[in-house]
Image (tube, rainbow, N blue to C red):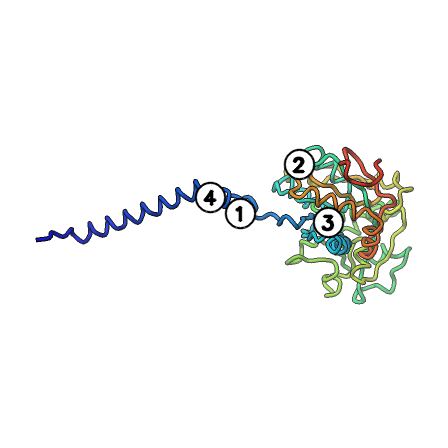
C-alpha cells in the first residue's frame, strides 16, 4: 500500500523546490549576464548617447533653442534643456550633484564664484543684455511711460510690478541693483525702496509664473526683465538710462558701486554680487557625460552660424566671445 505524505508536506516541498529553482536562475543570471543588467541602471536618468543636456537660464530658452535647432540639423545630436534661474541651475551641481553636458547662465560671474575650481576650470562670455521694464496693453499708467517718467509710473498708487527672486536668479538681483542705481541717477533718496515695495516676486503667484503670463492676464502691470525676453514675447517695454540698465561697459564703475548678498552654492552660505554689465556665460563641466558632443555644441554656438541663431532668439552675441581660464584645446575660439 502506498503511503501518501500529508498535503501540507507536499505543498511545503513544492514551494521549496520552486524557491530553489528561482535562486539558481538568479545566480546564473548574476554570473552570466552582469553587463546586460548594469548599464541600464547606470544610465537611469541620463541622456542617451546621441543627446546632450543643457542647464540654461530662463532668458536663454529661445536663443539656445534657436542654436539647438541648427546644431541638431547639422550633427544629428539632439539637445535636451532644463531652464530656470541661473543660481538655481548652478546649485543643481553644488547641491543636487547633477552634472549636465553644458551650463549656460545669465551671469557669467556665477561660474567662477560657485563652480570653479570644483566643477569646471573655464568659461566663455558669449552674449549681452539689458534690464528693461516690460508691460502689456493692460498696464495701468502705460500711456505715461517715458525715459524720464518710468520710475514715477512704477511708484504710483495702485500700480504693481513683478521681479524674480535674487537668491535664485540674476534677473532678481539685477532688478535690485538697477533700482538702487536709479535712486542715485535721479537723486531721489528712498526711490529704490519705493520701486521694490511696488514689486512682488514671481514666487508669490501659484505655479511657474512668468512675466508674459502675469502681464497679459492683468495680474500685474509691469515686470523687471531683460530686453531679449520682452522682444521674444512681443511685450511693450521701456528702456532705462544706460547708467541704470547694466548694459554699457563704459559705466562699469558706476554699476560696481552697488552690491548685495544673495544665497551662494548652498542655502547655508552667501556670496556678494556687484553691479556689472550683463554678460552671459557658459561652460562644460569636467564630468560632462557627453564631453565631445558638448564641445561641438559650444563651438557651433560661438561660430558665426551660432551667433546668427542667438540673434534670431533676440539675444545680442558678444563680439568676439571671450574665453577665461583653463580652456580645453578643442574649443575653437580666441582665448583671453
Q: Earlier in the sequence, mark 4 or mark 1?
A: 4
On the question of residue 59 being in view, the answer is no
Q: Earlier in the sequence, mark 1 or mark 3?
A: 1
Residue 264, x across and y down, in percent: 69, 39
Q: Which mark is residue 33?
A: 4
Would you name the residue on which mark 3 appears? Answer: 57
Q: CA distance from mark 4 to mark 2?
A: 47 Å
Q: CA distance from mark 4 to mark 1?
A: 12 Å
Q: Earlier in the sequence, mark 4 or mark 2?
A: 4
Q: Earlier in the sequence, mark 3 or mark 4?
A: 4
- Marks 4 and 1 in Cβ contact (< 8 Å): no
Residue 204, x across and y down, in percent: 67, 55
Classify 10 Å Cα crowding around label 3: few (below 14), some (14-19), many (20 and above).
many
Would you name the residue on which mark 2 appears? Answer: 269
The quarter holding residue 313 reads: bottom right
The C terminus, quarter of image: top right
Q: Is residue 140 above or below residue 266?
A: below
Q: Nearer the viewer, residue 301 or 271?
A: 301
Would you name the residue on which mark 1 appears? Answer: 40
Q: Earlier in the sequence, mark 2 or mark 3?
A: 3
**Front of the two marks 1 and 3:** 1
Q: Secondary structure at mark 1?
A: helix
Amino acid at each position: 500500500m502506498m503511503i501518501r505524505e500529508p498535503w501540507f508536506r507536499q505543498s511545503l516541498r513544492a514551494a521549496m523546490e520552486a524557491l530553489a529553482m528561482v535562486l539558481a536562475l538568479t545566480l546564473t543570471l548574476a554570473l552570466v549576464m552582469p553587463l546586460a543588467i548594469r548599464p541600464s541602471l547606470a544610465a537611469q536618468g541620463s541622456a542617451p548617447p546621441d543627446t546632450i543636456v543643457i542647464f540654461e537660464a530662463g532668458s536663454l530658452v529661445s536663443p539656445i533653442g534657436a542654436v539647438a535647432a541648427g546644431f541638431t540639423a547639422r550633427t544629428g545630436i539632439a539637445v535636451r534643456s532644463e531652464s530656470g534661474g541661473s543660481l538655481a541651475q548652478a546649485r543643481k551641481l553644488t547641491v543636487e550633484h547633477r552634472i549636465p553636458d553644458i551650463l549656460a547662465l545669465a551671469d557669467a560671474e556665477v561660474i567662477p564664484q560657485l563652480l570653479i575650481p570644483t566643477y569646471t576650470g573655464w568659461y566663455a562670455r558669449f552674449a549681452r543684455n539689458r534690464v528693461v521694464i516690460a508691460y502689456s496693453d493692460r498696464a495701468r499708467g502705460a500711456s505715461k511711460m517715458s525715459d524720464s517718467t518710468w520710475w514715477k509710473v512704477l511708484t504710483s498708487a495702485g500700480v504693481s510690478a513683478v521681479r524674480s527672486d535674487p537668491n535664485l536668479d540674476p534677473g532678481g538681483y539685477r532688478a535690485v541693483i538697477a533700482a538702487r542705481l536709479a535712486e542715485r541717477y535721479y537723486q531721489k533718496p528712498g526711490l529704490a525702496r519705493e520701486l521694490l515695495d511696488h514689486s512682488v516676486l514671481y514666487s508669490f503667484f501659484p505655479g511657474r509664473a512668468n512675466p508674459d503670463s502675469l502681464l497679459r492676464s492683468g495680474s500685474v502691470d509691469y515686470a523687471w526683465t531683460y530686453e531679449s525676453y520682452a522682444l521674444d514675447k512681443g511685450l511693450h517695454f521701456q528702456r532705462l538710462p544706460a547708467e541704470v540698465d547694466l548694459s554699457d561697459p563704459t559705466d562699469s564703475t558706476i554699476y560696481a558701486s552697488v552690491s548685495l548678498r544673495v544665497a551662494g552654492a548652498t542655502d547655508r552660505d552667501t556670496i556678494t554680487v556687484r553691479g556689472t554689465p550683463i554678460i552671459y556665460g557658459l561652460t562644460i563641466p569636467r564630468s560632462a557625460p557627453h564631453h565631445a558632443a558638448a564641445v561641438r555644441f559650444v563651438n557651433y554656438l560661438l561660430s558665426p552660424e551660432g551667433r546668427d541663431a542667438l540673434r534670431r532668439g533676440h539675444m545680442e552675441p558678444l563680439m568676439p566671445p571671450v574665453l577665461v581660464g583653463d580652456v580645453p584645446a578643442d574649443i575653437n575660439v580666441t582665448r583671453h
